[in-house]
Amino acid sequence: MHRDVFRPAMLMIETVNICNNDCVFCPYSSQTRQRRTMPPSLFAKLIRDYGAIGGGPVSLTPLVGEVFLDKLLPERLELLRNTPSITGISVTTNGTMARRYDDESLSAILSSFTRLKVSVYGLDAEEFRIITKRDEYNVMVEQLVRLLRLSHAGTVVVGLRHLRRREPEAVAAWLAEIAARADVAKVEVVSETREYANWSFFDTSKPLPLDGTWRPVKENTTQCLIPLVALQAMADGTISFCPCANFDGNPDLTLGHISEGTLADMLRSDKAAKLWRWDVWGIPDFCRTCSFHLQMDAAQSVPWLLKDPIRFVGG
C-alpha cells in the first residue's frame, strides 16, 4: 500500500518492443502490436506517476524486445538516476546489441544499473542459431565479455537458456572461459533452464528442438502472484495488469493508457479490483492455461519478494 493505493512492488517499462532475435520460445514475431519506441513524454509521465505512488525499483525489460535497440536509453537512464523516488534500475537483455556503444558509452550505461541480466541463448554456435534464428553467437560472446569487463562487480549476471542437455561440468567450463576473457573472478548465474513457458500462445504439443521442453500446462484456478510483483507499461503507453506474458496487449488485462490517466487511478479502478478477485469475477481467458502462472501461496517460499523484487524477476 502507498497511502490509499494498493500497488505492486515495482514498475516494468517496455521502452521498445523491437528485437534483434526471433527466439523459438518467444512470441515476438507473432505480436500484432506496432513495433515502436516509447516517446520520451510518455516515459517521463510514467516516472512521475510512479513517484506519486511511492516509487521504488524500475525494470526496463521489454515484454518482447531488446533494450539496447532503444536509442533513447542513455537519456532514460539519466532521468531515472535523477529521480529520488527510484531505488533501483534493472533490465534483462540478450546483450548482442551492446555493440552499438563504444566502451566509454557502455560503461556509463552500466553504471546506472543495479542489475543487468544477460539471457544467454545456447553455449555453442549451432544451439544459438537454432534458438535465435540468427548467426551471431560469436558477437553475443564478445558483447557478454565486454559487459562483464566494463561493469562494477556483481552488476552483470546471466541466465542460461539451453536447448541441449549439458553436464554441469561443461557449463562450468564455458562460464570459466567467459570469466577469464572478461578478467573477472566468476560469472554469476541467476537462472538456468531447458524448460519454457507457453505465453498462453504456443502449441506445446509441438516439440521444441534438440532437448528443449515446454513447461507443463495446467488449468489455472487460483489468483496469480506475478501481478503483485510488478505492473507493466508497454511501448505505446498501455498499462497491463500482467507484467509477464501479456505480449500482445490483451484487452482483458489492460488497465488503461498512461496518456489518459494516472497509475494511481488505474490501480484504484474497478477493473483492477476485479482482476484481483478471480475467485469472484472469474479468471481471464488469457490466464487460464498460462504456464508462467504462480499461485499466491508461492510467496511463502520467497519471503524477501516485496523487498527485493529485482531479484525475483532477475532483471
Image (tube, rainbow, N blue to C red):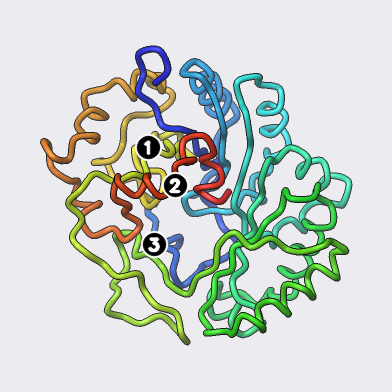
Tag 3: amino acid: Ser
Q: Are marks 2 and 3 in contact (CB under 8 Å)?
A: no
Measure the C-alpha gap from mark 1 to mark 3: 27 Å
Which label belongs to residue 134? none
Is 285 placed left or right of 200 in the picture? left
223 displayed left or right of 77? left
- The numbered disc on residue 30 is 3
**Mark 1 vs mark 2, CA separation in Å:** 13 Å
Q: What residue is pinned by disc 1?
A: 228
Check contact, mark 1 vs mark 3: CB within 8 A.
no
Residue 274, percent across and down? 19, 31
Q: Is residue 208 above or below residue 143?
A: below
In terms of image quadrants, where is residue 229? top left
Q: Residue 91: image x %, image y %?
A: 61, 47
- Name the foreground residue: 294 vs 94: 294
Question: Amino acid type of disc 2?
Answer: Val
**Which residue is painted at 82% across and 40% down in the image?**
108
Kind of residue indicated by mark 1: Leu
Few, some or many residues within 10 Å of mark 3 (<14, 14–19, 20+):
few
**Picture layout, residue 308 above or below residue 161:** above
Q: Residues within 10 Å of mark 2 (few under 14, many from 20)?
A: few
28 displayed left or right of 71:
left
Residue under the point 68% across and 26% down: 79
Residue identifier under label 2: 302
Q: Earlier in the sequence, mark 1 or mark 2?
A: 1
Q: Quadrant of the N terminus?
A: top left
Mark 1 crowd level (few <14, some 14–19, many ≥20, 10 Å Cα): many
Per the image, label 1 sits on a secondary structure element best described as helix
Q: Position of residue 23 (x, y in %)?
A: 50, 69
Q: Nearer the viewer, residue 267 or 308?
A: 308
